[in-house]
Structures are given as structure tokens and as C-alpha cells.
Amino acid sequence: MIEAPSPNHDSRPDGCVVDTIVLHATVLDSADEVVAHFSNPGSRVASHYTIDRDGTVYRHVQEERRAWHAGQSRMPDGREGVNDFSIGIELVNRNDGLDPYPETQLSALIALIRQIRSRHPIRYIVTHAEIAMPPGRKTDPQGLDMDQVRQELDLR
Ligand SMILES: [Zn+2]
């Protein structure tokens, strides 16, 4: 785990239970570019983690803090402001639907989520595309096989 701290976070609401993981694709083509973007206070955006194609995990924001990754968002159960109760994970990928997610990257993702589940009662794993408001605002992580991810984690 490489520490790559970002200033782009604030407090979660009092008594908030983290029960959701949001998956993203970076669009940016390299972890270096992602680290630079998230380290910049002007970007006003960061996820908790980024996973590079080779499986290297970067931590930008501590899990107890609210990272600014989902923007305007709504869960299928109607809850809004998904940043409040979620952990955001970015996968380095161009998000063009063609760029593959290597096996090393996916196994690092599964391992990271298993660790997170040992700390938080995670019940949902969603894509940014599924929760972004208004619908259609985001497409990431395009090309990621969510059936496979959910099946490996026994989540819906
Ligand atoms: Zn996203």
C-alpha cells in the first residue's frame, strides 16, 4: 500500500455506518496522473483508494473520512449523498470499454474489499455509473464485469 494523501475529504455525518463500496475507473491512464489529480486541492475530488493495473494499491483518504468521489448520487434504495456512507475505489483504466482490467488488478480489488469488509458492514457494491445523478452522468467503470466481482464477494 502506497500512501498518496489527498486534501479532498471532510467529516462523515455523525453516527454514519459505512455500508457501500463505489467502484470507479480513473479515465486517466496512469496512477501517477491520478495521484497528481487527487493531491491537488483545486480538483476537489479523491477516492479512498486507487488500484493500478499491476495491483499496486494507493491510499488517498482514510476510511473514517468522507472522500469526494461520487458527487451527486443516489442508491437504488433511495439514499442520496453516497459519499456519506461509502468507500470509493478507483481502478486505473481509460474507461473506453476496450481497455481491459488485468487479473492482477482484479485480484487486488477483491483482496482490498475483503479487508474493508473486516472493518465495515458492507452490504452494497455499486458502480459510479449506477448511482450518479442525474442518470447517465457517469459511465465508469466501463467494461468491468460486475457479475464476477459481486459473485466473488457474495454481494448483490
Ligand atoms: Zn467515477
Image: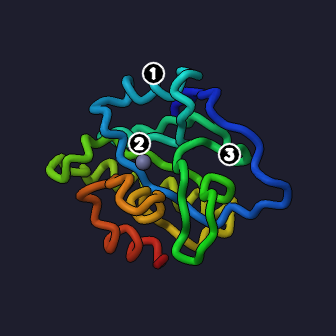
Q: Is residue 26 above or below residue 104?
A: above
Residue 51: which numbered mark, if any?
2
Task: Report x, y in % for residue 85.
Answer: 67, 59
Tag 3's secondary structure?
A: strand
* Residue type marked 1: Ala
Q: Amino acid at mark 2?
A: Ile
For label 3, count other residues whose C-alpha is less than 10 Å away and answer few (under 14), some (14-19) or many (20+): many
Q: Say if residue 151 shows up in the picture.
A: yes
Q: Amino acid at mark 3?
A: Arg
Residue 109: give x, y in percent of width and height.
42, 54
Q: Secondary structure at mark 2?
A: strand
Instruction: Tell me if mark 2 has few (under 14), some (14-19) or many (20+) residues whose alpha carbon lies within 10 angstroms of its own.
Output: many
Query: How far apart in space, not on screen, are marks 3 and 1 (Cα)?
Result: 19 Å
Residue bearing the label numbered 3: 66
Q: 5 or 136, which lies in front?
A: 136
Q: Which residue is mark 1?
A: 36
Q: Residue at x 31, y 33 (%)?
A: 28
Query: In this view of the protein, can residue 110 be seen by the observer?
Result: no
User: In the rendered image, which quarter is residue 141 located in?
Assistant: bottom left
Closer to the observer: label 3 or label 2?
Answer: 3
Which quadrant of the view contains residue 151?
bottom left
Which percent across, then down, holds residue 132?
46, 58
Tag in front: 1 or 2: 1
